Image (tube, rainbow, N blue to C red):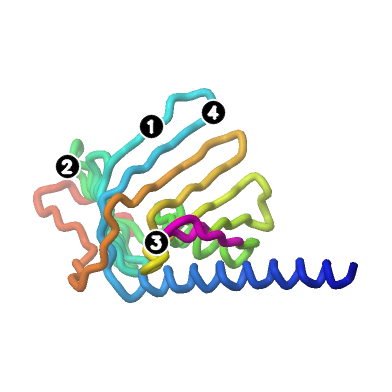
């Protein structure tokens, strides 16, 4: 009986180590390279029709440039730039870590791994990592990585009985070009809140 428990404990520990290793490789790849991709984000809320939006992203580490729903959003490591086309307004702020985690799911996933149990399974050519925060049993975060290069393909955040947010990267690629991650709109109304 003890051997059975020991075997189960060792298997769970190995799974957790593999999952953490895969996550570290993904985060390291995103830290050292520029990722570009088109994406869709789908928000499903209880008793409502799902809403799907299309966009594109360029990111390196915590820096990113995002185009979605007639908005451009950029973070250069210090300042967050949000340009709304319909208002021709550029807002500049210095976001908190929590605010950044709400915008960038990779930052959120990295933060969650510090307080969560993590598991991994292989499905075809993909690695599926499930992150369950120890502090919140109503939340599950799932990250699907391409096994060949650890690039993210899909992220899903499920809050039981509330909503599911799914981000699918449609064509993730690494590039050597790195933009400024700053939005410059000289003719826009500037709302500088720094």
User: Considering only order in the chain, which callout, 1 or 3, is on the residue closer to the N terminus?
Assistant: 1
Please name which of the two marks, 1 or 2, marks the residue nearer to the observer. 1
Q: In the image, which residues are magenta?
A: 119-128
The residue furthest left is 187
Q: Which residue is mark 3?
A: 146
SS of the residue under disc 4: loop
User: Considering only order in the chain, which callout, 4 or 1, is on the residue closer to the N terminus?
Assistant: 4
Q: CA distance from mark 1 to mark 2?
A: 25 Å
Q: Residues within 10 Å of mark 4 (few under 14, many from 20)?
A: few
User: Which residue is located at x 25 percent, y 60 percent?
Assistant: 36
Q: Which residue is mark 1?
A: 51
Q: Which residue is mark 2?
A: 88
Q: CA distance from mark 1 to mark 4?
A: 12 Å
Instruction: Specify whether residue 91 is in view.
Output: no
User: Considering only order in the chain, which callout, 2 or 1, is on the residue closer to the N terminus?
Assistant: 1
Q: CA distance from mark 4 to mark 3?
A: 30 Å
Q: Residues within 10 Å of mark 3 (few under 14, many from 20)?
A: some
Quarter occupied by residue 49: top left
Where in the figure is residue 17, as x and y percent of width and height? Answer: 60, 73
Q: Residues within 10 Å of mark 1 (few under 14, many from 20)?
A: few
In which quadrant will I find the N terminus?
bottom right
Task: Please report contact status of discs 1 and 4: CB closer than 8 Å, yes or no.
Answer: no
Q: Is residue 160 above or below residue 96?
A: above
Where in the figure is residue 156, as x and y percent of width and height? Answer: 48, 48
Q: Viewer-proximal residue, 59 or 24?
A: 24
User: Which residue is located at x 37 percent, y 66 percent?
Assistant: 62
Q: Which residue is mark 4?
A: 46
Q: Is residue 125 magenta?
A: yes
């Amino acid at each position: 009986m003890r051997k059975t428990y020991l075997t189960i404990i060792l298997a769970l520990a190995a799974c957790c180590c593999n999952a953490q290793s895969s996550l570290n490789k993904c985060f390291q790849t995103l830290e050292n390279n520029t990722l570009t991709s088109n994406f869709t984000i789908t928000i499903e809320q209880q008793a409502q029709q799902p809403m799907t939006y299309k966009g594109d992203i360029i990111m390196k580490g915590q820096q990113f440039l995002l185009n979605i729903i007639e908005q451009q959003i950029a973070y250069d490591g210090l300042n967050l730039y949000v340009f709304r086309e319909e208002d021709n307004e550029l807002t500049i702020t210095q976001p908190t870590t929590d605010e950044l985690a709400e915008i960038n799911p990779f930052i959120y996933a990295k933060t969650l791994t510090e307080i969560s149990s993590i598991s991994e399974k292989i499905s075809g050519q993909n690695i599926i990592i499930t992150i369950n925060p120890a502090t919140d049993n109503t939340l599950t975060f799932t990250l699907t990585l391409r096994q060949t290069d650890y690039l993210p393909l899909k992220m899903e955040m499920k809050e039981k009985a509330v909503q599911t947010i799914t981000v699918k990267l449609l064509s993730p690629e690494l590039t050597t070009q790195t933009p400024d991650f700053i939005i410059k709109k000289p003719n826009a109304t500037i709302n500088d809140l720094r």
